Amino acid sequence: MNSEKIYMGADTSILLSNYDFKKVSELTESDQTYGNKLIKSERVKSPGDMYRIITKYGNSFVINGDSSILIYKNSIKCIIRRKVKEIPHNDIDLSIYKANIEFPRLNLPIQPYLFGFLLRIRSKNRRFIRFSNFSKIFIISSIRKLKLKYFTLKDYILVVISRRILKSLIQNDSIPNIYKKNSISNRLELVAGIIDSESSCDPLNKFIEIKGLKKNLCRDIYSVLTSLGFNITYRYNFMDQWIINLYGSDKLSNIPMLVKKYNIEPSTPNHFRIIKINSSEAVLLEIEKTNQFSIITNDFFYI
């Protein structure tokens, strides 16, 4: 049996085989990690060479120095594997490698672009949506499934949102798992609908801002965006309103937006800091290696 032992911080979240995330300190015997078999998880005394890795965008996780992570070497545009304790702490040529996570493609009751669009209009209590005829093939079947009234005019489609649908949207403050844990293409369409419905660009063209979010919806959009490898931050504004900033990268061109046309400048690489810490306790994960990667953390680092 090809087993491997990894020491991690108790609050670090990892991806499970059922596509949920759970803190390593909360794992039970029935939990299995994504792509590998979990043999044992137990709290132990820290091995003494624990490190906290802090990304440019504010995420962090704790791991022992003998574990390896994949990082991106910007000068040669190459992915390399290094033990944490061997990574130069101030090498600005290195950045965190963020990859798309693929989930099974599932059939959806509503086309993901339209679903994303509808999620955002509820905050404005809008009764009409105007779509260009260019987007007709993406939404017309879902409009009919929802039994919404619509009018096809010369240059656009006007959709009437009934009070019943609007009430349902207002009550729903999260994204169902069938949308969050679907294929990359479906998640990209979901994101496109969210951005097209209601978003803005900062004056310096550094990021796309999605604001006016309730906490649960902010959490779910954050999960979808990070699973697609985007660099984002989120913050609390006021009156239970949250804001997500989506920063520029070559991955933005993969979002099939139909309405908004943003010219976001590429962000600088996702640099990180490594800090050696004194931790009295850690969680020891022993896994049976069946995959080339060991663990995927909550910000999608491959370890």
Image (spheres, grey):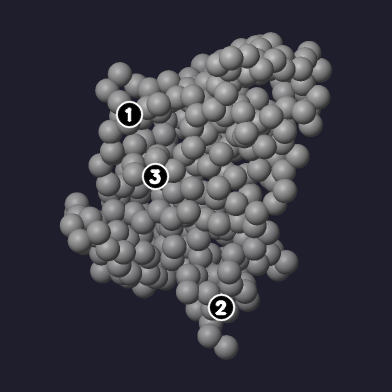
Look at mark 1 in the image and give the residue it sits on.
263
**Amino acid type at mark 3:** Lys
**Amino acid type at mark 1:** Asn
Look at mark 2 in the image and give the residue it sits on.
290
In this rendering, the label closer to the viewer, 3 or 2: 3
- Classify residue 131 as left or right of residue 61: right
Q: Position of residue 129 (x, y in %)?
A: 63, 16
- Classify residue 229 as left or right of residue 142: left
Evaluate whether residue 44 shows in this view.
Answer: no
To which quarter of the image does residue 47 belong? bottom left
**Amino acid type at mark 2:** Thr
Evaluate whether residue 110 shows in this view.
Answer: yes
Look at mark 3 in the image and give the residue it sits on.
251
Instruction: Find the distance from the CA under tag 1 to the CA under tag 3.
Output: 13 Å
Q: Position of residue 9 (x, y in %)?
A: 48, 58
* SS of the residue under disc 2: loop
* SS of the residue under disc 3: helix
| 107, 290: nearer the viewer | 107
Name the quadrant of the C terminus: bottom left
Q: Position of residue 216 (x, y in %)?
A: 63, 32
